[in-house]
Amino acid sequence: MTKIIGIAGSLRQHSYNGGLLRAAAEAAPGGCSVDIGSIAGIPLYNSDLEDKEGIPETVTELKEQFAAADGIVLVTPEYNNSLPGVFKNAIDWISRPPEDRPRVFGNKPVALMGATPGSFGTAFSQYAWLPTLRALGTQVWSGDLVWVSGAMGKFDKNGNLTDDGIRNKLQKSVAAFAAFVERMKA
């Protein structure tokens, strides 16, 4: 069984990206599961806090989900043509302490996708993630990219995907990423 962890980089209750992640999890092919993690409750990174109190429990739980997974899906919003600070903050916490990076991220396949009301479909945000993901030692998958633009017309008011074309693209993309993860495991 291929085990993938997915997280959406928005804290908004009815986030388009949360909806895209749920739809991606539903689109997982047989023999693959996509578990949904959350960045909710992760404090702003502060090394004084880390030194004084250690890694927060919310971070430890998500970090262990990452470590146990065969692959990672990051579903990223795009804010001001870049990645969301709250999402980057979560990954920064998960990467602590530095000695743990190989266990959590080392050579792990990562897929990026995202949804935005804008017209470029989170392309800038996804590109902005690349230096961080390289620094963490991941293997960024670049096939069948999912960039959803005009999200307000493709999700309902509760953030659920309503567009069949995007749903079909997700099925192909998640299946292709799962196959990539399987090849990386071998």
Image (cartoon, rainbow, N blue to C red):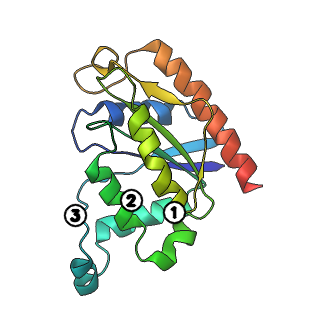
Q: Position of residue 89 (x, y in %)?
A: 30, 59
Task: Give the CA separation, mark 1 to mark 2.
Answer: 10 Å
- Looking at the picture, does residue 23 appear above or below residue 74? above
What residue do we see at 66% from left, 34% from top? 176
Q: Is residue 128 left or right of residue 117?
A: right
Badge nearest the viewer, 1 or 3: 1
What residue do we see at 43% from left, 65% from top? 63
* Label 2 secondary element: helix
Q: Is residue 6 visible?
A: no
Q: Is residue 49 left or right of residue 143?
A: left
Q: Position of residue 25 (x, y in %)?
A: 48, 36
Return the residue at label 1: 136
Crowding around mark 1 (Cα neighbors within 10 Å: few <14, some 14 to 19, many 20+) is many
**Callout 2, which amino acid?**
Ile
Q: Position of residue 181 (x, y in %)?
A: 66, 47
Badge nearest the viewer, 1 or 2: 1
**Callout 3, which amino acid?**
Leu
Return the residue at label 2: 91
Quadrant including the C terminus: bottom right
- Looking at the picture, does residue 21 appear above or below residue 148? below
**Callout 1, which amino acid?**
Leu
Q: Is residue 103 visible?
A: yes
- Mark 3 or mark 1, which is nearer the start of the sequence? 3
Mark 1 vs 2: CB contact within 8 A: yes
What residue do we see at 47% from left, 19% from top? 166
- Check the image and name the residue furthest to the right: 186
Return the residue at label 3: 44
Q: Which mark is residue 92?
A: none
User: Is residue 164 or residue 113 the one in the foreground?
Assistant: 113
User: Is residue 105 or residue 185 the one in the foreground?
Assistant: 105
Image quadrant where residue 128 sits = top left
